[in-house]
Image (tube, rainbow, N blue to C red):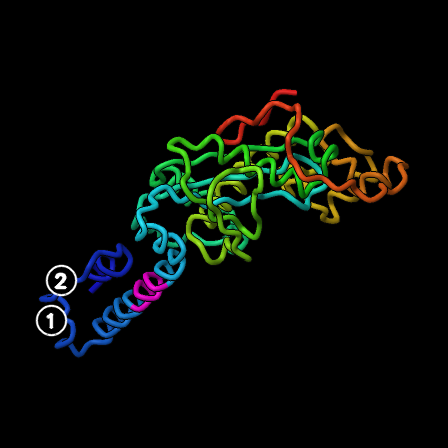
Amino acid sequence: MAALRARYVEGGRPLPAAIEAELRADPRAGARAILGAIARRRRDNRAEGQRLRTMLRFETALWKTGVVHVAGVDEAGMSPLAGPVAAAAVIFAPGTRIPEVDDSKRLDPASRARLAPVIKARAVAWAVAFAEVEEIDDINIYWAGLLAMRRAIERLAPAAEHLLIDGRKLREVPLPQQGIVKGDTKSLSIAAASILAKTTRDAHMVNLDAEFPGYGFAKHKGYPVRQHVGALERLGACPIHRRSFAPVREVLGLPPLPPWPIRTSTTLAYPTADVAGTPPKM
């Protein structure tokens, strides 16, 4: 029984029909336990299969019309007080399914780290780009997020034919597109992009922690948690803090910003970010 459990339960191998029949005829509790575990795994696999079919409904509808290069687009890092905002774009071949891919916020760091290289290997094309702190402070975080998305899309090779974007539309990108509210929970391509954007930005913040020690960037990634706010009050702002964000302005003794001017473009004089999350050189 121990060998069967190790192979077919713990090892996850398919249970041959002949062995399953023998286990069903075996009255021992160990046999029933193995069959129960196999049954649960089969139910979980069916449920995951259904979830993936649902997560691919936008992509599948486009694939059926002959649109092959459907890109999911999402960003990460809109609310931190420090560091760039990242965006990713991912194109999968028609019919691609990757179990466990979901909105990055629903996954723990270990799962995101495990899935990111799988997404990159299975994708037809992927790209990650940043909008830097100077850009965030120049045009505001909303437009900087769109700028990072546009940069990621422009770096896809092959290029996208249609965009699926988490809750937004990019007027400057001349491609058919759908803005899907909570798209990272409804589209596999957008969810994959959310994972790549999140893992790339997190890794970049770990590197910045070594350059700007004391703030805890490696742990909280620049988000406004208590540890970060305390360090900001104690040490003051460093060059990667977003000076357009109220907590940073308060520490610097700066007045609140007036309302941002109406803007219809993300075009800037800054250089574009490199693929795979390399920030632009300022």
How far is the residue under mark 1 from the one under mark 2? 10 Å
Residue at horizontal 73%, vertical 45%? Answer: 227
- Element at label 2: loop
- Element at label 1: helix
Q: Is residue 46 magenta?
A: yes
Mark 1 neighbour class, 10 Å CA radius: few under 14, some 14 to 19, many 20 or more: few
Q: Quadrant of residue 124?
A: top left
Q: Which residue is mark 2?
A: 16
Q: Which residue is mark 1?
A: 22
Residue at horizontal 15%, vertical 69%? Answer: 20
Would you say residue 114 is visible in this rendering?
Answer: no
Q: Is residue 236 left or right of residue 193?
A: right
Depth check: 270 or 44 in front?
270
Q: Quadrant of residue 270?
A: top right
Which residue ends up furthest to the bottom in the rendered image? Answer: 27
Q: Is residue 15 left or right of residue 122?
A: left
Question: Where is residue 245 shown, x and y percent of the image?
Answer: 77, 41
Q: Amino acid at mark 2?
A: Pro
Q: If the image is split into quadrants, where does the N terminus sit?
A: bottom left
Mark 2 neighbour class, 10 Å CA radius: few under 14, some 14 to 19, many 20 or more: few
Say whether disc 1 or disc 2 marks the residue closer to the N-terminus: 2
Depth check: 42 or 167 in front?
167
Which residue ends up furthest to the top in the rendered image? Answer: 281
